[in-house]
Image (spheres, rainbow, N blue to C red):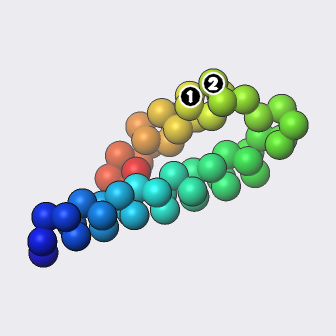
Amino acid sequence: MHTLDHNIYVLYIDLKSYKLLVEEYLQYANYKTAKMVDFIQWVKLAKAKKPDQV
């Protein structure tokens, strides 16, 4: 695979997994009480739980 194609593919995968994380987080937290700081902490926890997927 060409390097640029590969990088775009990896970026796409990362964006998809972050989109899933955001959706998951918003189910976990109320939309109105969701804070960026909490989200970042939550992403770190999610990454720690499944480092191979995120």
Label 2 packing within 10 angstroms: few (<14), some (14-19), many (20+): few
Q: Which mark is residue 37?
A: 2
Amino acid residing under circle 1: Gln
Q: Which mark is residue 41?
A: 1
Picture quadrant where residue 53 is located: bottom left
Q: Nearer the viewer, mark 1 or mark 2?
A: 2
Horizontal side, residue 32 vs residue 34: left or right: right
Residue that protrudes farthest toward the left in the picture: 2
Residue that protrudes farthest toward the top in the picture: 37
Q: Position of residue 23 (x, y in %)?
A: 67, 55
Q: Position of residue 40 (x, y in %)?
A: 56, 31
Report the residue at 75% width, 51% height from top: 27
Horizontal side, residue 54 vs residue 16: left or right: left
Picture quadrant where residue 31 is located: top right
Amino acid residing under circle 2: Val
Residue that protrudes farthest toward the right in the picture: 32
Looking at the image, do the residues carrying marks 1 and 2 touch, with CB atoms under 8 Å apart? yes
- Measure the alpha-carbon separation of dots 1 and 2: 6 Å
Report the residue at 39% width, 63% height from top: 13
Residue 38 in the image: above or below residue 49: above
Q: Where, quadrant-wise, is the N terminus in this rendering?
A: bottom left
Label 1 packing within 10 angstroms: few (<14), some (14-19), many (20+): few
Q: Quick one: SS at disc 1?
A: helix
Q: Quick one: SS at disc 2?
A: helix
User: Of residues 41 and 19, which is closer to you in this image?
Assistant: 19
